[in-house]
Image: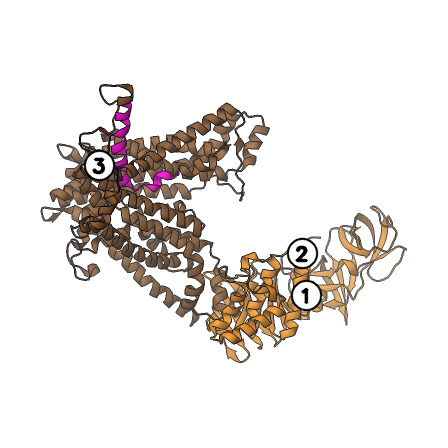
Amino acid sequence: MASIQIENVQKAFGKTIAIDQLNLEIKDGEFFTFLGPSGCGKTTTLRMIAGFYYPTKGVVRFGEKDMTRVPPEKRNTGMVFQNYALFPHMTVFENVAFGLKVRKVSSADVKLKVLEVLRKVRLEKYSDRQVSQLSGGQQQRVALARALAIEPEILLLDEPLSNLDAKLRDEMRAEILRLQRDYKITTIYVTHDQAEALSMSDRIAVFNYGVCHQVGTPAEIYNQPANDFVASFIGEINLLPVQVDHVEQEDIAVTLKNDGEPVKLIVHNHTNEDELNKGNLAVSIRPEAIRILDTVETGTNVLKGKIAAVQFLGSIVNLMVQIDHVSLKVDVLNTHEFGHYYQGKDVYVELPEKQLRLLPVISGEVNV
Amino acid sequence: MFKNRDTRLTIWLLIPVVFVLVAYVLYPSLRTFFESLQSDGSISLGNYQDFFVQESKTNLLALWNSVYISILSVFFSALIGIPLAIIFNRYDFPGRSFFSTAAILPIVLPSLVGVMAFMFLYGESGLIPNAIKDLLGLEKVPFKIGGVSGILIVHAYTMYVYFYMTVSAAINKIDPSLEEAAYNLGANRIKVFWKVTFPLLTPAIVAASLLVFMISMASFSAPFLLAGGYRVLSLQIYFSKINGDMEIAATQSVILSIVSISFLLFMRWYQNRKDYRMATKGIGAHRSEVKNPFMKWLMVGFGMIGVLILLLPHFTILLLSLVPDGTWTWQTYPSVFNLENYRLLFADPNIFKPLKNSLIMAVIATVGNLVFGVIASYLLVKRKFVGKSFVDILVMIPWALPATVIGMNLVFAFNEPNVFSFGQILVGTFWILPLAYFIRHIPLVVRSTNAVLEQLDDSIEEAARNLGAKWFYTFRKVILPIIMPGVLSGTLLAFIESVGEFPTSVLLYTISNRPISIEIMNQLRMFNMGQAAAYGMIQITLIVIVLFISNKFFGIKAEKAL
């Protein structure tokens, strides 16, 4: 078991900078996820931890040890590859035993350990099969078993579930979590799937274009996104460009930047002050945080609008509410009778000030 | 440091590979080039001037003859190969799959043995013309092959396979929905074929044409045995060498190489050009069943006759190999058949020697090819280094150079001691032939290994290293076992080609290391065709065994490596 420190790491391929100024600390025994769209640098970072790339600048440490330039075979990390990378000419047993044989473990011990790990992943009956005879989910388990058999200090998972169908993916998600808790092993999980990241991780690092935008628990990432990229990459969100009017202790009064009548809102939740003093700003609110009021009401952040579209999804109903020149996505639970919300209906919406979050816009203009 | 360790490894692997390529591919070629610039002890273009403005025009005529024969070979090979590919891949009728396999039979015939078979089948005293003469009670044989017609028939027979294979592959890649779309838009069958299918096949046809042109420019065995007084350039090189006109031989070699290499470059350019390659993957073959019973059985009939014609040379060799020495002299047909030739092959040390020589030299060359091929291919596919395209080109040179030229290159490079021969004169020794076979088959083994290594995902190697295995352990226990089947099928092919190799052998052999092909030539000169055919049968058997092993155990079509 080990913690991982990544200090001021930069990785360049020729002139392209894949990772810039990365600082991360992954705690001992933590389930840590690198989340981001493809090409964001998350796999590059994972491969620097595994030793397949080495940083152009900066230091990678496992615990106290400087691992920056240690070759991959001396790092004692267990890696599960996206395509599993099982050795096609070996049986399940031989695949799992490979790392132990390399470590010159006696063959009696190899047998014992391999069977134990295979039992853990529930594949003990398949130990003599050729890997090509296994289903995708089973191959996934062999890859996990192979990585765990060497008792690695760190488990590295590179988009391990992306080749499985939806149902198996849910099953394997639980399986990976169970094994991780079982072995209490420091785990880095790379994915572009936000649902996976939110449901499995202790903490998440969100990447885009080689930059880590935010590190935090799933709830922090979801509820207090650092900027518009994090906010819109994870879950559905309404982003409205605004201008700050004035600050009053905890509350900030803002005006929507749109073509119509100025709309003023009070915001309670924001990223740190420094970020707010430079560049463009937007307020964000999750669709499920917006309240639809059926009766005429006045108060802070209550706006009058009209339902522009209704989408019935079963447990929830998606509404598109047009307020002057702004449209808002609103999710309501399916608690009313069918037809309660219809296109063209006049409604009042409340944007609770604690749910409205003021954040910096880093990806250029936000469309209204 | 990780990067440095890996870079070091790349360099350590690269050193022997580059050494071999420079010493045995690049240096000999340059040596020939310098030789061609020597005239009367000074450096000049005199030899080239002689080549083009010589009064008798012998050389220029030979060059023209080579080009002429190559163009006609392309034409006739295409005429056989393309229709066969279309019929076998588009129509379904009884026996189709058997016929389509039989269509690649000509590659199961070593070139020299094939030429010999054709001589005895269709030549002046050939079995077929004489049989027709006797059956119809004619005065003279109705036809005979020899000279240009003989070369062309042999070329068409052996080279149509390239058209057949490339066009077949292209047909199977065409998305059926393209043709269906054309039908849907109202085009009839003929229009669909000429406006949709055929244009999609043109890249394959052009590629095959260039390939056949190159191969037939380099062709040596057929002109050697059939040309008579007809001169082609590959043969001229041999004659110049025999006459001791080394500077002229060098000049002829350079000119033949230039023609071949420019075709290779043209081919590469053409293949890398953006063409309408199909984006769709994994299209099932769609064949229309021939419904009309008359047509159906007509096709089966033609198929049978075709297979018979394809197999005739093999049968002829088999038949001839059973005719003992001195029993077929004035008679029209052989009358005595027994296994005497095979008995002698193993009983008479003089007759066994060439077989033993060929096998030993082919094994040496092939082991070299295997080791070199795996390392070179691993570097080319899996490693990054400066100058990769240079190494890539050096690897391909022996493929582009005609065998005769490779032979001459070795003559010029190693008839004197130098660093690359470790201070020895290699010409006239045993080692020059294995070296020649090795060089000839570098591209074949590297290319077939490249194909399997490209299939091997990089993450497999990374997984092994992640689990703690060092590079060499990973290479031995993971990479090699996975790629071995593919590598071996290419290597076995190199082996059988080495056993039958003629053009370089004839330039470099000595009495003590004479291989099968030379002995076949000697036996033919002594009119002992039975013994020559017995050698041929050994080669055919070897080839059949190799193809069988490749198909059965490696699940790989060996002919794909060609």
* Quadrant of image for the N terminus of chain A: bottom right
Which label number is shown at residue B498? none
The residue range painted magenta reads B103-132
Which label number is shown at residue B225? 3
User: x, y (%) of residue A137?
Assistant: 62, 59
Residue A217: in magenta span:
no
Of residues B473 and B496, which is closer to you in this image?
B496
Chain shown in brown: B
Circle count: 3
Question: Helix, strand, or loop for circle 3?
Answer: helix
Which label number is shown at residue A166? 2
Subunit bearing disc 1 = A
Q: Residues within 10 Å of mark 3 (few under 14, many from 20)?
A: some
Question: Which mark is first along the chain, 1 or 2?
Answer: 2
Subunit bearing disc 2 = A
User: x, y (%) of residue B105?
Assistant: 37, 39
Q: Is residue A273 above or below residue B447?
A: below
Distance from Cα at disc 2 to Cα at disc 1: 13 Å
Q: Is residue B444 above or below residue A192?
A: above
Residue occupying the point 25% across, 33% down: B120
Amino acid under label 3? Leu
The residue positioned farthest toward the right in the image shown: A295
Of residues B494 and B534, which is closer to you in this image?
B534
User: x, y (%) of residue B363?
Assistant: 29, 55
Subunit bearing disc 3 = B
Q: What color was chain A assigned in the picture? A: orange
The answer to whether residue A233 of the structure is visible from this angle is no
Of residues B313 and B374, which is closer to you in this image?
B313
Distance from Cα at disc 3 to Cα at disc 1: 75 Å
